[in-house]
Amino acid sequence: MWLSVPTNNDSSSTESTYSYMTSSSSTRPPSFSSSSSYDPRSEAGSRGTAGSTETVPHVPSHPCTRYPSTLRVASLSGKASIRDVEQLAVQYGSMAHMGLLDPSYSVFVNEAKTGAICFKTLYKIAVVMGDPMCDLAQIASLLSEFSLYRRRKRWGMAVLGAKTELVRYFSEGEAESRSTILQFARERVLNPLTNSVVNETSGKRILTQCRQLLDARKGGLTLHIYIPSLHGPDHRLEAELRALYDDWRTARNKSRRPQAFITQYDPFLMPHLMTYIYTTGPDGAVNGFAALRWIGANDGYHIDPCIAAPGSRNGISDLLLFAAMAYLRQLGVSHLSLGLEPLESIEPVSEMSPLLAHLTQRIYQHTFRRLPIPGKRAYFDKFKPDDNQDAPVYLIFSSTIPEPRQVVAVAHIANISIRRLFIREKQKEAS
């Protein structure tokens, strides 16, 4: 298991303040196949060596006793399994598929087991997260099967977090009916290979803070990397990380600040997709961790959560993000997704009536002003995202005029309480 430990080196280089070491017989990190498609679960790419011609990572065949009930996996025949989902996530997963780590989400798998859709049902609306996990040529057939499944349940549909390919499908008339398409956010992405912060040519404050936290005479923190698929599960460590996450989530929810686009994770729901970077203090207790989920659609990772224990020293989450970039740079990974950054104004893509466009913009801007989105943008910007990898993110309603239950379902998924926002507004007006 690869880990990073502080040294007493007084060099001004941040990376010189910790060295990568191994606690197993392996002397190298997980590598790439010949197509540079990184497998996060195998030291040799797929089942072969680094020069293997197998380009699709392989999910181990042994059973995983930590999986939840397969009731969250759906199909027309009922024969799909969680392993089918994981195999597709390895190849086609994206940032928007964060629901894979949330037990309240379901996943629909087609009969050929070549595609899957991650969704959550609220108010009889199946809110699909991101693009379908399949080859582009199979989007139409997969959505057709999903439509049949929804008709059995009498569910409507909306898509949150769609990318350009799915927008093209809905906007070019291939869908069953006309849709309302809105750009509401962009995905922010770091490139660990070129990032100026991890290359130590910018971000002086971050670098100084990281050095101090890793200095044995100051912060005394130690960095570790845990890859459960490589060396088996560490149940004691996972219990510590889970407890930290629960404490952090409780503290966040008590803050009473409106939050948007927050997913409630089970960080160990699909361990074969995951790498965990965590910090311990001088007493050996875990005080921060970052979860890196492999996203095959981009040959990279999505980092979320990236958190510090409540009451811990400032700067731990910055240190974890810096360490994640440093680690992925060693692996040659050029894509580290930070997640969504909502836009200040919503951008209609499909044709809308002037009245509907005006109302949509007013509601969105009213909501935007009451969410801590500018702070999120500032946090992303200080780590110098790669503009070339930024991608627009869309919201799709499967009707020309969104139904109220579609809007409410999407708002619920995005963790936006419309009622709470307006209550806060009335309280401000009364004060």
Image (cartoon, helix red, strand yellow):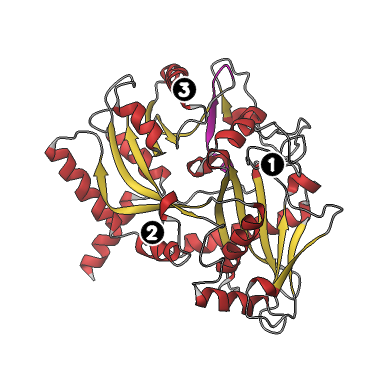
Mark 3 or 1 closer to N-term? 3
Label disc, if present, on residue 258 of the rendered structure: 2
Indicate the position of residue 5 as horizontal and vertical percent values: 74, 69
Residue 365 placement: quadrant? bottom left
Which residue is depicted at the point 72% across and 62% down?
A: 224
- The amino acid on which the numbered mark 3 sits, given as a three-letter code, is Ala
Which residue is depicted at the point 77% across and 32% down?
A: 63
Cα separation, mark 1 vs mark 2, equals 33 Å
Q: Secondary structure at mark 3?
A: helix
Cα separation, mark 2 vs mark 3, equals 40 Å
Q: 284 or 344: which is nearer to us?
A: 344
Residue span colored magenta: 101-112
Let me know if residue 302 appears in the view. Answer: yes
Cα separation, mark 3 vs mark 1, equals 27 Å
- The amino acid on which the numbered mark 2 sits, given as a three-letter code, is Pro
Residue 407 placement: quadrant? top left
Indicate the position of residue 127 as horizontal and vertical percent values: 42, 34
The image shows residue 35, relative to residue 202, as above or below, that is above
The image shows residue 34, relative to residue 169, as above or below, that is below
Q: Is residue 122 magenta?
A: no
Residue 229 as seen in the image, left or right of residue 82: right
Label 3 belongs to which residue? 137
Residue 328 as seen in the image, left or right of residue 184: right
- The amino acid on which the numbered mark 1 sits, given as a three-letter code, is His
Indicate the position of residue 91 as horizontal and vertical percent values: 59, 34
Label 1 belongs to which residue? 272
Q: Secondary structure at mark 1?
A: helix
Mark 2 or 3 closer to N-term? 3
Mark 1 or 2 closer to N-term? 2
* The N terminus lies in quadrant: bottom right
Whether label 3 touches label 1, CB < 8 Å: no
The image shows residue 9, relative to residue 402, as above or below, that is below
